[in-house]
Amino acid sequence: MAKNNQSLKIGFVLDDSLDTADGVQQYIMTVGSWLTRQGHDVHYLVGETKRSDIANLHSLSKNVKVRFNRNRMSMPMPASRKLLATLLRREAFDVLHVQVPYSPFLAGRIVQSAPSTTAIVGTFHIAPHSKAVHTANKLLNTMIRRSLRSFDSIMSVSSVAQKFAKQTFGIDSIVVPNTVDTAPYMSATALPQYKNDLTVVFLGRLVDRKGCQHLLRAIDYIQKHRLVERPYKVVICGKGPMEQQLKAYAEEHNIRTLIEFVGFVEEEEKPRYLASADIAIFPSTGGESFGIVLIEGMAAVRGALLAGNNPGYASVMGAHPETLVNPNDEAAMGTAIATLLNNPGMRKAARTWQLSEVQQYDVASVGARIVEQYNAALHKRKH
């Protein structure tokens, strides 16, 4: 068994696929890449995944696509217990780092099949968007309660996730926040076409929960009331089922010339789009346990962030309540956007505190705290 200051063999466990780049996937890839750079041996034990660019990837189930908590995801079909037992025996992991909540059909079986010498650590990720999500997770708790007893330590990515973990699963956890490798964001430069323009950037899926429709209503309010003194543009980064509806709204309300829909943005291009923002706005209405995109924005934008006033985003931005807006109040949100567009001094001040605030979320800081949890769990197993 590995000891403090020695290389660990770590298996990240995720029921979902790594073919998408949603929040949980970003978390394990960011932390896993950092751990690899520190000399640890990192593996990914995941649901059905087709990509071939990840070392030590173990695709262990067939998955079916579902919608849950207003997110798209995939859930595993029952994985072979024999296959899992063989893998765990062969690899002899020091630590299994499980993403919670999880399915009894893959992660649950991995936990139950793990050798007694392997430490089990979890990270709880979700915050509920509805009573139905509460109910579904209470039912899930009855299915995985036994395997939860095998965990040596559980972290939550925010105080909101921590509270939900306790209420729904009876889990006691410590908050170790979500994380980003901030270096490529802090060093990003604005894309040439936006370099000299006053620019508002939205980055996210074009689905109801992420709130792009509320942003367009706020822009319509700004235009109708002539709140902004100089030309500006709004750049919408993302794709999704609401795209045509959003474009139609912009046409009908005579704001289409202000709006640029750029479609899906690859991960490597995200920093440059965010660096182009005098204002980056994320008007999500809920279902956010944390908000990785807020940290990316803090590190990259040349101006200020505005975020929906949901509990997950408030856990990140709450020390600066002026950054939180009610997505359902287009007048208030439009006024907040206009105030920042008209005041470069306010945007500069926001940029200063954002750069200071983001340091606590950098992967070097958060990764070290995660390794502390690994070592504490290993010590607990040994003694």
Image (cartoon, helix red, strand yellow):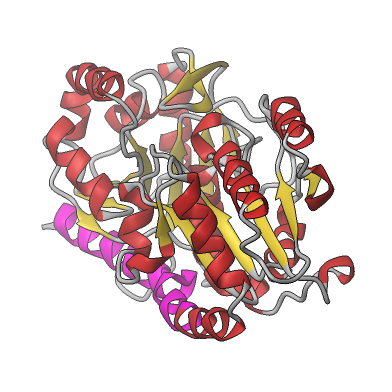
Please state if 40 lies on the left or on the right of 158 as rendered.
right
Where is residue 271, by image quadrant? bottom right
Please state if 374 lies on the left or on the right of 152 as rendered.
right
- Identify the residue at horizontal 42%, vertical 36% (top origin): 88
- The residue closer to the viewer here, 137 or 312, is 312
Residue 92, placed above or below residue 73: below
- Identify the residue at horizontal 33%, vertical 20% (top origin): 104
- Identify the residue at horizontal 39%, vertical 39% (top origin): 286
* Dominant secondary structure, magenta: helix
Residue 350 at x, y = what percent?
49, 79
- What segment carries the magenta color? 354-382
Kindly tell me whether residue 380 is visible in this rendering: yes
Where is residue 59, by image quadrant? top right
Where is residue 274, by image quadrant? bottom right
Quick check: is 127 in the magenta stretch?
A: no
Residue 34, placed above or below residue 173: below
Residue 354, placed above or below residue 366: below
Residue 337 at x, y = what percent?
56, 62
- Identify the residue at horizontal 17%, vertical 31% (top origin): 168
- What is the total number of numbered labels drawn onto the structure image? 0
Quick check: is 376 in the magenta stretch?
A: yes
- The residue closer to the viewer here, 287 or 97, is 287
- The residue closer to the viewer here, 193 or 181, is 193
Question: Which quadrant is the C terminus positioned in?
Answer: bottom left
Specify the farthest residue to the right: 193
Residue 84 at x, y = what percent?
44, 26
Please state if 232 lies on the left or on the right of 17 as rendered.
right
Specify the farthest residue to the front: 225
Residue 46 at x, y = what percent?
52, 33
Please state if 165 lies on the left or on the right of 75 as rendered.
left
Question: Which quadrant is the N terminus positioned in?
Answer: bottom left
